[in-house]
Image: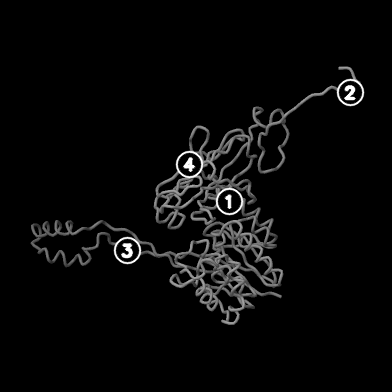
Amino acid sequence: MTVIKVENLSKKYLIQHQQKEKYLALRDVLTEGALNIAQQGSTLLQVVARRKHFSDLVRRSPSTEDFWALKDIDFTISEGDRLGIIGRNGAGKSTLLKILSRITEPTTGRVSIKGKVSSLLEVGTGFHPELTGRENIYLNGAILGMSKKELDRKFDEIVDFAEVARFLDTPVKRYSSGMHVRLAFAVAAHLEPDILIVDEVLAVGDVQFQKKCIGKMENVAQEGRTVIFVSHNMEAIQRLCRRSILLDEGKIVKQGDTAEVVNDYLQLGPGVIGEKVWDDIDKAPGDNVVRLHAVRLKDKDGNIATSFDVCDPVAIEIGYWVLQDNHMLDAEIILKDISGHMILYSPDNKDSPWSGESRTAGLYWSTCQIPGDFLNEGQVFVTVGVSNNPYTCHALAKDVLNFDVKDTFDPGGVRGNFCGTWPTCPVRPRLPWKVERQPLKNRSE
């Protein structure tokens, strides 16, 4: 049975641009007035009157532009389907989910939905910062359509799933972003909806909680309910979703088997990126404890690079602002291959001078040195973060950089004299081997 049918769906936004005009200060108006008095006999007051907006330092004239976030979208979803929606930032994924969740209306087209919909699109949506976690469970549940009796029955299960029992009577304004998303997902997932819509908010949670959420969504689907899942985590998409849709510039460019759609998405990926810098601390990824400042890839000579020989080391440099004292923090990296499979995870907690100790506020730099003869050839994607113990992720940049590892067939590396195709695997480390010789028994040497 079809539970969602989308026909010729389009969404247009009107974008307004501001065009700067000449800078006009009061000094300029007075100067112009004096010249006009001398040359034309006009009065200063007349000049000022003509400049009705002389107090504005910059005058602007608006222009508008039509922006189609979605264009001519058509698809259907059957009961019990697990549909993944993938695409680059700005492809139209969130706009599509907002229309399916009835938050916004389409410009053209039609959406038919059968059943109760539960959506988790933004961290803490429907939460009041001054209310406690306990109070927000009831508030958010009521917004999502749950009765008081139903919430009473599921309250303990929601709290156990969210793992916030210790902070249940604390105002949520003091919750970390990870605690926000745990509680929000727990409420939405226990609504027992016919259709569960989940956006990329799970990226805020820690790895164990993400696995827990995916397991919950699998259970929801096995019970015959429908799941729509948006994520940049291709491993999670492939694990959960049997069918996927690829959006690019507001249009569907591929839909069908998830493995095939993911492969097409990866081919659309951006070129290699060796550096990302956030100069504005207020807009950088993070929270009130940590904000990211920069992530860089450097070669053996200390230069920013995006291509490395398999025999050469790769340095990943992370700069981050610590904004509060007395936090035990670890910088960490995750490397993934082009299919989204994790190659390695590494924190700086063992080699840091602050290992086991709280850090004071300041700008920190952590550098991870990946040795040569470790990674296999291919494209590698870098995720960086800063977290504390017990685990709360304070700052995260997913797939923020990517680089190529190339095999130049250098016999001085792990390849040695082997000239064939190296087996497909994420790493190819040069490991210590011990080779011994013993004479054959009953044979002369």
On-image quarter of the N terminus: bottom right
Amino acid type for the residue under numbered disc 2: Lys
Type of amino acid under label 4: Pro
Secondary structure under badge 3? strand
Q: Nearer the viewer, mark 4 or mark 1?
A: 4
Q: Which residue is mark 4?
A: 353
Q: Earlier in the sequence, mark 1 or mark 2?
A: 1
Give residue 118's position: percent from left, percent from top. Answer: 59, 73
* Mark 3, residue position: 61
Residue 112 showing in the rendered view: no
Name the residue furthest top. Answer: 445
Which element is circle 2 on? Answer: loop
Q: Amino acid at mark 3?
A: Ser
Which mark is first along the chain, 3 or 1?
A: 3
Circle 2 packing at 10 Å, graded few (<14), some (14-19), many (20+), is few
Quadrant position of residue 52: bottom left
Q: The C terminus lies in which quarter of the figure? A: top right
Residue at numbered disc 2: 441
Which residue is label 1 attached to?
Answer: 269
Q: Are marks 4 and 1 in contact (CB under 8 Å)?
A: no
